Amino acid sequence: MQPYILKKSPPLCGEIPVQRSKNASLPALAAALLTKDPVTLLNVPDLTDIDNMLALISSLGVTVSRELSSVTLCADTISAASFSPEHADRLRASVLLIGPLLARCGEARLLLPGGCAIGSRPLDQHIKGFCALGVRFSVADDALIARCDNLRGTHIRLDSPSVGATENLLLISVMAQGETVLDNAAREPEITDLISLLNRMGARILGAGTTHLTIQGVPALHGASHTPISDRIAAGTYAMMTLATGGDVFLRGANPSHLSSVLHILSQIGAKIIPDTDGLRIRGAKLHPVSLFTAPYPGFPTDLQPPLVALLSTVPGESFVTERIFEDRFRYLPELRKMGANIFVEGGTAAVSGVPALRGASVEATDLRAGAALLLTGLCAEGETRLSGVPHLLRGYTNLERNLTGVGAPIVLPDP
Ligand code: EPZ
């Protein structure tokens, strides 16, 4: 795909419609496999991660129908044996299909999942919980094979509050026999949203929003329709792009209550933030350096670490950003340094010295959120930036070019 051609942007001004959450939509699609009834998701974001997940799901025999932004899945027949490898290796969220396949078929065969190049991303917490519920694992070629006769509820304590493991164990335990308790669970808004959908499908889950979840198994689930929550990471990304250009943007549909730690940091940096009934307005001002670390929700989200570091590269003074979730999430820094960023990393902490001006360069996105960081930098650097690796961005940001050009960003796709 053609690279983006970026130039220094005037202040971004106007309104950006914030998409529904990618990371809430993906587990919701997996949840639809738990019932023979139709499940409809409304306002699903138009993203390649969603396309890949739907292709993988339909390769399992599930009927998928899409009409504008609504998706209806009907898993009246489902077969674990026919997964389509070409989609599984590009999508970390494919691992979320293991739970529903085990619950429905007693077997799951999936390629070891792909996803972003931000760390080893093991599955030990998923496997620990599955084994506790009675699942047996084997590996054949490069596929993970899981089997179970009947799933029995039990008490599981995660070693770390893994988002994916929490989602997977919710998906498998809703139809296990008896009660399952999940301790040290993650409590991201996307998990609360999944619990809301599952309970609407007839599940009996208590403790949403806490680290202690209790699931009473039920014999079967029924269909439902659901609108995923707003995408807090997309909203945070657009907010940082607004600040980087000294703009004034209304983020329609953003949910400030899912962004508390992010808005706290942006206010510390100097942003003016005005929450509203259907979103929030953010205005640039004189920006100041800040120090923070990423953490599980409600802490500062790791997915906004790259765009934040890019923003801080333009802020006079010394900022310190510590990444505590993924061990390799500073991989994009060499590309940022090509544009003049002055960043030194030691022991998981990036020391960011703001520079008076960044300079345009040819750079490449190595993953989704790294792409967002480089796009932000290209909008505030002097001169032209050629940003390649655009497909990474389209995995997670809907209508990205239209949203940004609509508030004045000079993004040009070169002639094909
Ligand atoms: C989800 O990934 C998100 N993806 C990620 O967003 C997000 O960065 C991450 O949660 C953290 O918030 C989706 O929801 C599709 P984890 P996930 O399991 O579930 C370690 C984006 O840009 N870990 O909470 O894979 C793991 O290595 C993506 O939208 C284990 O050690 O994240 C990591 O260091 C990127 N063992 C940490 O926990 C396990 O079994 C957090 O991982 C599982 C995870």
Image: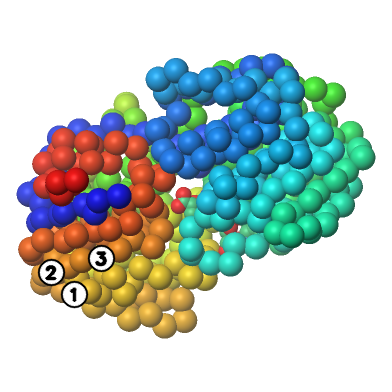
Instruction: Classify 350 as above or below 39.
Output: below
Answer yes or no: do the residues labelled 2 and 1 have beta carbons within 8 Å?
A: yes
Image point 29% across, 36% down: which residue? 399
Q: Determine whether the residue tagged by mark 2 lies in a helix, strand or loop.
A: loop
Say which mark, if any, is on residue 359: 2
Q: Cα distance, mark 3 to mark 1? A: 12 Å
The kind of residue on which mark 2 rests is Arg
Image point 65% across, 26% down: which residue? 62
Nearer to us in this view, 401 or 17: 401
Pointer 2: residues within 10 angstroms few (<14), some, or many (20+)? many
Compared across the picture, whether 308 is left or right of 282 comes to: right
Mark 1, residue position:
340
Q: Position of residue 305 (x, y in %)?
A: 38, 61
Say which mark, if any, is on residue 363: 3
Instruction: Classify 340 as above or below 309.
Output: below
Image quadrant in which you'd find residue 296: bottom right
- Counting residues from the start of the chain, the first of labels 3 and 1 encountered is 1
Query: Which residue is outermost to the front?
Result: 416
Image point 85% across, 46% down: which residue? 147
Ligand 1 quadrant?
bottom right
Instruction: Classify 222 as above or below 139.
Output: above
Q: Position of residue 255 (x, y in %)?
A: 39, 35
Pointer 3: residues within 10 angstroms few (<14), some, or many (20+)? many
- Counting residues from the start of the chain, the first of labels 2 and 1 encountered is 1
Q: Cα distance, mark 2 to mark 1? A: 6 Å
The kind of residue on which mark 3 rests is Val
